[in-house]
Amino acid sequence: MIKSQTVEFLKQLIDNNNREWFQANKAAYDIARENVIEFTAELIKLLQQMDPGIDAALDPKKAVMRIYRDIRFSKNKTPYKNNFGISVPTSGLKSGGVEYYFHITPGASFIGGGYWMPENDHLKKIRQEIDYNAHDLKSIIDAPDFVELFGEFRKQEQLKTVPKGYEPDNENLDLLKLKSFIAWHPVKDKELFKADAVQNIAQICAKIHPLNIFLKNALA
């Protein structure tokens, strides 16, 4: 489980997002990060049982993303993220692409998966797969249990124009215009603190698994 002290650290970081405070509380950060790494190790083991594509060599420490922000090109100059992010790729060891993602932040944690903002070549392949096999994707995203957990898949950000190479009357235009292909489910703080939290998160990931399989097949 995620300890309440881990979320409490993030709450304090949100109120004191500066290097002086962080350095003074580095020990508390290290304890919180170690809790997240231990949770990640358990989660990876469960996900590997469900999704054999996850690399057996995936290091839980590397799956936990850096808390330091890249502020070089950002108007927001706060140096630290207000969350712990866990990225579990469905193939290989590199984060990004088709993955499971767990986001821990006070009052707004969530578990998600799919492919967020695919690069152009990948986006073309996913659109082609949708055009050829839309029925397969619809059978996943329109299933009642999927909608109950993740909401309406089609309500993600879309292009304002018709994608190049497709016609305005394409029956699957709403799916072809999507910029991302993700499913996510909110997780309350009190759910993080339960002894079976990692099992519950893994069960939600199991509902995302068919979507990830569809996306991986598109990119194969």
Image (cartoon, rainbow, N blue to C red):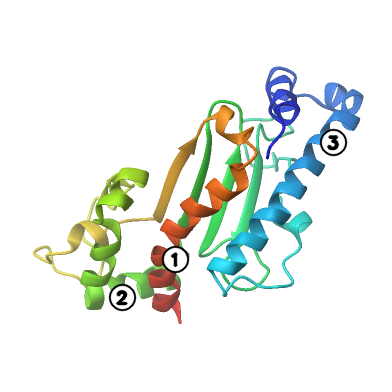
Could you tell me which quadrant the C terminus lies in?
Answer: bottom left
Q: Is residue 115 visible?
A: no
Comes first in the chain, label 1 or label 2: 2
For residue 130, which numbered disc appears in the image?
Answer: none
* Residue 9 placement: quadrant: top right
Residue drawn at the location 43% of the way across and 67% of the way down:
120
Image coordinates of residue 67 in percent, x first then y, are: 73, 41
Q: Amino acid at mark 2?
A: Glu
Residue drawn at the location 31% of the way across and 75% of the way down:
129
Do the numbered discs 2 and 3 sit on residues whose CB atoms are within 8 Å?
no
Q: Amino acid at mark 1?
A: Asn
Residue drawn at the location 39% of the way across and 67% of the way down:
123
Q: Marks 1 and 3, Cα distance to the nearest angstrom?
A: 32 Å
Where is mark 1, residue-wise? 212
Vertical order, 89 against 22 (above or below): below
Q: Amino acid at mark 3?
A: Ile
Q: Taking 141 as reference, is 19 left or right?
A: right
Q: Taking 4 as reference, is 153 left or right?
A: left
Q: Residue furthest top?
A: 15
Comes first in the chain, label 1 or label 3: 3
Image coordinates of residue 118 in percent, x first then y, are: 46, 62
Where is mark 3, residue-wise? 31
Query: Which one is in front in this view, the residue at disc 2 or the one at disc 3?
Result: 3
Q: Marks 1 and 2, Cα distance to the nearest angstrom?
A: 13 Å
Q: Residue furthest front?
A: 195
Q: Taking 118 as reference, is 169 left or right?
A: left
Do the numbered discs 1 and 2 sit on residues whose CB atoms are within 8 Å?
no
Where is mark 2, residue-wise? 129
Element at badge 2? helix
Element at badge 1? helix
Image coordinates of residue 25 in percent, x first then y, are: 87, 25
